[in-house]
Image (cartoon, rainbow, N blue to C red):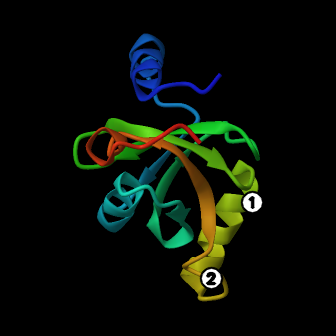
Amino acid sequence: PIPTPWLYELLFRCLGRVVAAVEVGVQGVRAFLYGNDILLQSVERLYPPIKRGGYVAVIDPADGRVIGVARALYDYRSIESLVEGLKRGSADPNAPVFENVFDLGCFVRGCRRR
């Protein structure tokens, strides 16, 4: 089963903190809500634990709300390393790091289950 954005919101409220999530920049939010994957250049903040192949909440930094669910293509340390590489100019900014599983834009686009 795939966790829903609403389940993540409830989990964060119960725990009093954010876990297993990625916060993305403005362009990343737009692209994600149109069904696209999250690229390295869009990663603003990581909230461990993040395991390769595991689900994460995707957070819009404008309001802190969960806008969807993605699957990690790398683990937490690997993504951190890629982000550092991006800052040094040695990583591809267009490399996908999270695969879009479900986004709230589906309600507008009429998505079908993958």
Asked if residue 101 is positioned above or below residue 40 in the image, the reply reads above
- Taking depth in this image into account, of 16 and 23 the one nearest to the observer is 23
* Helix, strand or loop at mark 2: loop
| 64 lies above or below 34 | above
Q: Residue furthest left?
A: 63
Where does the image place residue 75, in percent across and percent down from the top left?
74, 50
Image position, residue 73 (x, y; %):
71, 55
Instruction: Identify the residue at horizontal 53%, vertical 60% (top origin).
Output: 37
Task: Tell me if residue 83 comes above or below residue 108 in the rendering.
Answer: below
Is label 1 in a helix, a strand or a loop?
Answer: helix
Q: Earlier in the sequence, mark 2 or mark 1?
A: 1
Q: Which residue is mark 2?
A: 92
Q: Position of residue 17 (x, y in %)?
A: 45, 25
- In the depicted structure, whether residue 4 falls above or below residue 30: above
The answer to which image quadrant residue 114 occupies is top right
Give the residue type at disc 2.
Asp
